[in-house]
Amino acid sequence: MGLNVFDLLLPRETKFFELMYQQVALLLKGAVIFKQLVDNFATTSESDLKVAIARIKQCETRGDDVEREIVYALHKTFITPIDREDIHVLALNNDRALDILNSISRKIKIYGIKEVPQNVCGFADIIVRITEELQVAIRHLSKKAGREEAVAKMRKLENEADELFHRSMAELFENHKDDPVYIIKFKEFYEHLENLVDAIDYVGKLVRGIMVKTG
């Protein structure tokens, strides 16, 4: 490919890739904290629970800062490495995933959850793994190579989460039919977990769309 004189005179600002990577790194950090929390919930003290929830909130707050930084930079940058609309939508949806994760962690306290079903731990594991693949996809967004495989793995993990959700719903209504409060509480909790996986997978779909545009 020949050298573009226009790009030499007006170089493309590439810091957007780093900022989006920071967003996903914060999401992964929060997901790991959440996984550690639910995996060890039986032995977690009330104070440790509060600390874990606060740490996830810190990730969400820092994610908001990065999202605002991306939007501000878009207003100040003449030429972006990929379509500015794509950058904006990626940033918004990365931030949305962090918001959902923060909301889920807070519901543990709000709902007064005293025990965590094994399926919640299964969701937490999927959330960490799909975020790891999103991190790979974002890291290679500017390099092209490596994105396709990561996005494909994300799709498989989203399907795995779908199966886990349906199994969780079936077990919930079968095993707790005499406890409607428990059903209402965990039905919503599982729905939020599935929404989080879907939100992360949606960012993967956005990356795939960029792949189609940029080749």
Image (cartoon, helix red, strand yellow):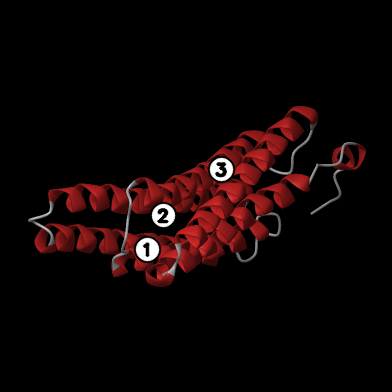
Q: Which residue is mark 2?
A: 197
Callouts 3 and 2 close, C-beta under 8 Å: no
Q: CA distance from mark 1 to mark 2?
A: 8 Å
Q: CA distance from mark 1 to mark 3?
A: 20 Å
Which residue was labeled with disc 3? 95
Query: Which residue is at a point 61% across and 34% down the rendered structure image?
Result: 85
Q: Looking at the image, tell me whether mark 1 or mark 3 is earlier in sequence order.
A: 3
Residue at point 35%, 48% (across, down): 192
The residue that mark 1 highlights is 123
Q: What is the C-alpha distance between the residues marked 3 and 2?
A: 13 Å
Element type at marker 2? helix
Residue 151 in view (yes/no): no
At x 13% / y 59%, what residue is drawn? Answer: 176
**Spot occupied by residue 91 in the image (x, y as percentages of width and height):** 60, 41
Q: Check the image and name the residue furthest to the right.
A: 9
Kindly check if marks 1 and 2 are in contact, taking CB atoms under 8 A apart as contact.
yes
Q: Is residue 28 above or below residue 87?
A: below
Regarding mark 1 in the picture, which secondary structure is present there? helix
Residue 128 appears anywhere in the view:
yes
Q: Quadrant of residue 117?
A: bottom left
Front residue (pair 117, 77): 117
Q: What's the residue type where badge 3 is placed?
A: Asp
State the image coordinates of residue 213 (x, y, percent, origin top left): 59, 45
Mark 1 and mark 2 lie on one chain; the one further toward the N terminus is 1
Classify 10 Å Cα crowding around label 2: few (below 14), some (14-19), many (20 and above): many
Q: Amino acid at mark 1?
A: Phe
Q: Are marks 1 and 3 in contact (CB under 8 Å)?
A: no
**Quadrant (top left, top right, bottom left, bottom right) of the N terminus:** bottom right
**Mark seen at residue 101:** none
Task: Examine the rendered structure and indicate whether residue 79 appears above or below residue 137.
Answer: above
